[in-house]
Image: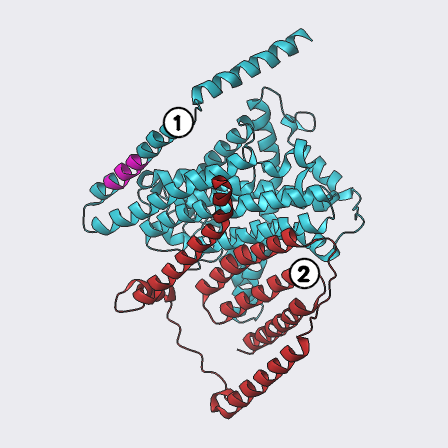
Chain colours: A cyan, B red
Amino acid sequence: MNFLSDPVTFIGNWLTGLVANLGIPKETASAWVTGVAVGILPLLAMLWVLVLIWYERKVIGRLQDRPGPNRVGPFGLIQPVADMLKIFIKEHILPAGIDRIPYNLAPILAVGGVLGMWIVVPFSATVHGVDINVGALYVIAVGAIGTLGIIFAGYSSNNKYALLAAFRVVAQLISYEIPMVLALLVPVLLARSMGMNSIVQAQPVWFILIAPLAALLFFISSIAEVGRSPFDLAEAESEIVAGFNTEYSGLKFGMFYVGEFLHAFTNSLIFTALFLGGWQGPGAEQFPILGFIYFFLKTVVVHFLGIAIRGSMPRFRIDQVMQLNWKLFTPIALAAFSSAALVEKLATNWADAARIGIHFLVNMIILGVVVLIGGRVFRARGIRLDALAQRNRAAVKFSMEKSHDS
Amino acid sequence: MILDQVIFLITALVIIIAAILVVSVPKMIHAALWLILALAGIAVLFVLLQASFFAVVQVIVYIGAIAVLVIFAVMLTRKAMQDDGPQLNRYSVLAAAVCLMLFVVLTGMLLSWDGASSLPVNPAVHPDTIINLGESLTNPQGYLLPFEVASILLLAALVGAIFIGREHRAGKEEE
């Protein structure tokens, strides 16, 4: 075990040895070091948000043909720090008629729910918080606590718009939990374990190749779970002011903001661990630091995809959000899950390549059926996708001509 | 071991206080919020019993789904912001008497059982309790039949709910 190949374990062992040298029993010493690590992990996650905010604003800026933050520091790198300091020193306004305890608890729950997920993420072959044997389920359970935070915020602010926003966001969140959990069950089924680390270890072949449909559903549902564009009904300014956090100011609003950005990244982490092989890669077992790098790179790719979608898609209406979930995602997720279970049972003793091929084939068949039926339903209702696209293009052209004129 | 007991006592105290508040606070929405605390306490109890699966399921099902639905129902059916109706109806004395009787009988029964005065033996926990659970739920020799019957019951409830929800609209279409 040396520093270069596995720094975190090395530092952990070194610290434990250091504390043990003070005459404290070995077990107490390692408990202390664990306690320190428990403090450091959320701290690093929160600081990481500074980078995430800069990165996201920059990428969305470039996608929309703007420079993004570019004034404070090189490439605007210091901008989030300035924003953070500003939000620290802003006044905390308590609106009249609020319900004080839930009002103050809501931002904590919103961030706490996200930070809780980091506990089970396997960062490399040796570095993970705890490898509980229900890790995948735990991720969903902790996510549910964030939902609670939104309800608390909406109810306790004594503001009609906040309440309305909380209603529809929560409706969206609990709806999208269903396809998300069903899609999550597919890797659990394939790995035959709910522990996050065992799921990663079961992926010499990435699960996205075995279960592309489940991966797609999980990815889209997790965007909906964060409530980002195109599912950003929580902040439809034209309809509900600023959403469930309208009445929050200063650091309390900042907590919701941090929670959202961190949630998007955390979901990318979870997606990478579940479908992209986590830290798996050449040499990751011998040199855990390589696994960390692989994990990070894959996560950044997934996260970039999420940001690109956020930067380029218009917002759904609430009925479209619900229809998409209940009429499309949930049935597909059910079909994908039950077909995966069936194939896994029938092909238990087959060669790996044949098994994976059949999984992939079944997924493609389901996708084909969905596209065929979906197209027919759309046509039956007189909705032409290409006509919609044409109309959108015409609208964009019109607005561009208008802006040229002025 | 002593730490476990301290945590258990604190959790039990929190659960009991929260449970009493659920039925005693005047605002319905506050009752729902206290209910969440009580349910979270039960999840902690599951953790103390090393039943991690049940702890997680408790959080998902009870806090994530049922408590949220309860809050929804309260906010949609009552005036969520100001709701200070009477807390007792005219059967309250009768109900209290029945509860008291039930409490006395149950306590008497429990006191006569010698398990009540001895410390519980920690069950030998198998590390893979989920696997045991899953196998016993899908094994025909195990609990497959009751499990499936329960799911049929739930399905029937679902169909019934949809029927009640749709009946009204069907009547309208006939007019």
Q: Where is residue A18 drawn, in percent x and y?
A: 55, 62
Q: Quadrant of the C terminus of chain A?
A: top right
User: Where does the magenta region start and end?
Assistant: A358-366
Q: Estimate the spatial distance between the alpha carbons at disc 2 and disc 1, rounded to whole Å.
A: 47 Å
Magenta span has A360? yes
| SS assignment at label 2 | helix
The chain that hosts pointer 2 is: B
Residue type at the position of mark 2: Met
Identify the residue at image location x=34%, y=47%: A337
The chain that hosts pointer 1 is: A
Question: How many residues crowd around disc 2 within 10 Å: few (fewer than 14), some, or many (20 or more)?
Answer: many
Question: How many residues crowd around disc 1 within 10 Å: few (fewer than 14), some, or many (20 or more)?
Answer: few
Q: Where is residue A353 drawn, in percent x and y?
A: 22, 41
Compared with A102, B128 (above or below) is below
Residue A327 figure quarter? top left
The residue lying toward the viewer, choosing from A161 and A252, is A161
What residue is disc 1 on? A380
What residue is disc 2 on? B28
Q: Where is residue A48 drawn, in percent x and y?
A: 59, 42
To the question of a shared chain for discs 2 and 1, the answer is: no
Identify the residue at image location x=66%, y=34%: A239
Magenta span has A338? no
